Amino acid sequence: MAEIFRVFVSRIGPLVTAWDTMYNLFTIKDTRNTLTFLCVMTYAIIYNETVVCLLPFTPLLAMLFIFHNYFYQVKFKRPPHAYFHSMRLLQTIMQATGDTFEVQHYIVENFFYWKSKEKTLFTLNLCFMAFIGMLPLLFIPLRYLMVAGLWGVTSLSSPFFMAVFKSLAQIGLEYGIVFERLAPAYTEAILWKIEMVYIPTIQAILRWIPIINRYVPGTKQRKDSVERRHGRASQNAEYSLNLPQDSRGPVSAGTSQLSSAEAASGRRTTYEVQQHQQ
């Protein structure tokens, strides 16, 4: 078994050379070679019909290559055996494969099978956002996406883009913390506007449609529903006011919650009065 493995390692030189070549191209070891490779692949992907039309001429190129070798008496030279380099590559591939499967098992178990509710809920939100963000892909040709991905993966190794990505990540982290603090207030304002402005407007429009107006609640029914929700909110606010100081937390937190609740209740009451007068 050891002898078979040693022979196998000594004969994968072409695969190791191909791997090194692609690695050097994508990590921009030589800028000229990388740009040449990207330009050729961009043309081949976007104008793949032209490349397909050139396929019948491939045997002619092979014939020219054979005659070139005969005329100049070119001898074939086998690539040198880099046993230790091939062994290091195999070890790297084996370690990366093991780590990849371990990470996949962790992700599937925690993010898809509800072992961790927080991670699973995060996965649901991420999938929904990815669905919304990937809708434009229905109208963008696949070839342009492949070209953009090719240039994007290659640009990750550029020092300029690495510095830009680090700066953007830092800015996104800072603004993410600020957004997390301000999101509840903005969400409350948006929900109030949807409930008190947009929904009544849509219902008022639907009441003019002959058949659909049978299933649209009337103004009185909506007013009663809003009053019931407003009454529950007022009861919750009064209950929080009647709690002892120790259970409510610091005075500043209770005051801020009370002021926000009173402000929201005042806005709702004013808007209901205006709607009733109209």
Image (cartoon, rainbow, N blue to C red):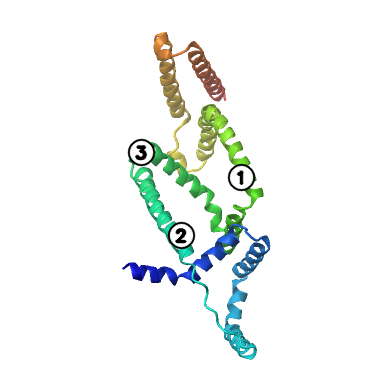
Q: Amino acid at mark 2?
A: Arg
Image disc number at residue 116 = 3
Q: Secondary structure at mark 1?
A: helix
Q: Of discs 3 and 1, which sits in the foreground?
A: 1
Badge 1 is on which residue? Answer: 165
Question: Is the residue under label 1 in contact with that under label 3 (CB below 8 Å)?
Answer: no
Identify the residue at horizontal 35%, vertical 38% (top origin).
Answer: 116
Which amino acid type is marked by label 3?
Ser
Image location of residue 179, percent across then percent down: 56, 31
Residue 236 place in picture, x, y as percent: 41, 18
Q: Nearer the viewer, mark 2 or mark 3?
A: 2
- The residue located at (41%, 54%) in the rendering is 95
Image vertical order of residue 233 relative to residue 183, above or below = above
Residue at disc 2, secondary structure: helix
From this viewpoint, which residue is outermost toward the right? Answer: 32
Could you tell me which secondary element the residue under label 3 belongs to? loop
- Horizontal side of residue 194 vs 44, given as left or right: left
Q: Residue at x 60, y 53 (%)?
A: 157
Q: Quadrant of the C terminus?
A: top right
Q: Any mark on residue 145, and which? A: none
- Which numbered tag is attached to residue 88? 2
Q: Is residue 51 above or below residue 269?
A: below
Q: Quadrant of the N terminus?
A: bottom left
Q: Which tag, 2 or 3, sits closer to the chain's start?
A: 2
